[in-house]
Image: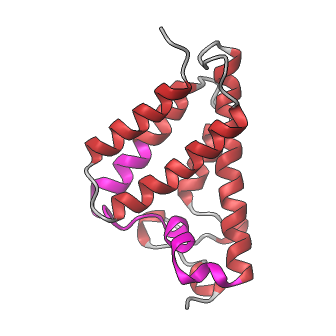
C-alpha cells in the first residue's frame, strides 16, 4: 500500500508534485470550471479536455492519480482518504458552480437539481478517468458525456 508521501508525488503528466493544496493539476481545471460563467459549454469543454488528456498522447491510459487511488488500496489510509474527499468536493463544487451559471442562463431543464447533477457529473469525471485507463474509446466517452449533459440541458 502506498503511503501518503508516495501518493503526493504526481506522475509526469501532472506536471508537478501535488503539494500545497494536495491536489493534482486536473483538479485545477475543475477550479477554473468553477469560475467560468458559460454554463453548460464550460462543462462540455471540461469533459472534452479530460477525455483528450486521458485518451491521447504520451500519457494516454495512465488514468488519473486521484481516480486510481479511489479505486485502489491507498484509500484505506485516513490521510489519503481525506485528500480524495477534498478533491472530490472541489470537483463537485466547480461543476455545481457551472451548473448554477447554466441555470441563470436558462440552459438547464427546469426539473434539474444542480446539486444532484453536480454529483452525477463528478462521478462521470472519475468514470472517464477509470474507463480511459482501461482503454475505452474516446468517441464512446464523448457520446456518454454528451448524453449526460443532454439529460440536464433545456430542450431546444
In the picture provided, is 19 more to the left or to the right than 69? right
Q: Residue at x 65, y 29 (%)?
A: 99
In the rendered picture of this protein, how many numbered marks are placed on residues?
0
Q: Report x, y in % for residue 82.
A: 74, 71
Instruction: Note whether 147 is above or below 106 in the view shown.
Output: below
Say if the magenta span includes residue 70.
Answer: yes
Front in this rendered view, residue 151 or 138: 151
Q: Quadrant of the N terminus?
A: bottom right
Magenta part of the protein: which range?
49-77
Q: Report x, y in % for residue 4.
A: 65, 84
In this picture the colour scheme is: secondary structure
Instruction: Note whether 146 is above or below 154 in the view shown.
Output: below
**Looking at the image, can residue 95 be seen?**
no
Instruction: Note whether 122 is above or below 145 in the view shown.
Output: below
Say if the magenta span includes residue 72.
Answer: yes
Front in this rendered view, residue 36 or 41: 41
Q: Residue at x 70, y 52 (%)?
A: 90
Q: Residue at x 66, y 16 (%)?
A: 110
Q: Residue at x 70, y 30 (%)?
A: 113
Q: Quadrant of residue 109?
A: top right
**Looking at the image, can residue 56 be seen?**
yes
Q: Quadrant of residue 89?
A: bottom right
In the picture provided, is 76 more to the left or to the right than 124? right
Q: Report x, y in % for residue 40.
A: 55, 26
Front in this rendered view, residue 61 or 135: 135
- Main SS type for the magenta part? helix
Q: Specify the farthest residue to the front.
A: 111
Q: Report x, y in % for residue 83.
A: 70, 70
Amino acid at each position: 500500500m502506498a503511503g501518503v508521501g508516495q501518493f503526493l508525488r504526481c506522475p509526469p503528466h501532472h506536471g508537478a508534485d501535488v503539494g500545497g493544496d494536495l491536489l493534482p493539476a486536473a483538479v485545477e481545471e475543475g477550479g477554473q470550471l468553477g469560475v467560468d460563467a458559460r454554463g453548460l459549454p464550460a462543462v462540455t469543454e471540461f469533459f472534452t479536455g479530460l477525455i483528450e488528456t486521458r485518451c491521447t498522447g504520451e500519457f494516454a491510459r495512465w488514468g488519473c492519480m486521484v481516480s486510481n487511488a479511489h479505486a485502489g488500496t491507498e484509500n484505506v489510509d485516513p490521510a489519503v482518504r481525506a485528500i480524495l474527499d477534498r478533491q472530490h468536493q472541489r470537483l463537485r463544487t466547480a461543476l455545481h458552480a457551472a451548473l448554477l451559471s447554466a441555470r441563470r442562463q436558462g440552459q438547464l431543464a427546469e426539473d434539474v437539481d444542480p446539486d444532484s447533477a453536480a454529483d452525477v457529473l463528478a462521478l462521470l469525471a472519475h468514470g472517464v478517468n477509470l474507463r480511459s485507463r482501461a482503454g475505452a474509446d474516446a468517441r464512446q466517452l464523448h457520446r456518454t458525456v454528451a448524453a449526460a449533459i443532454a439529460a440536464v440541458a433545456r430542450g431546444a
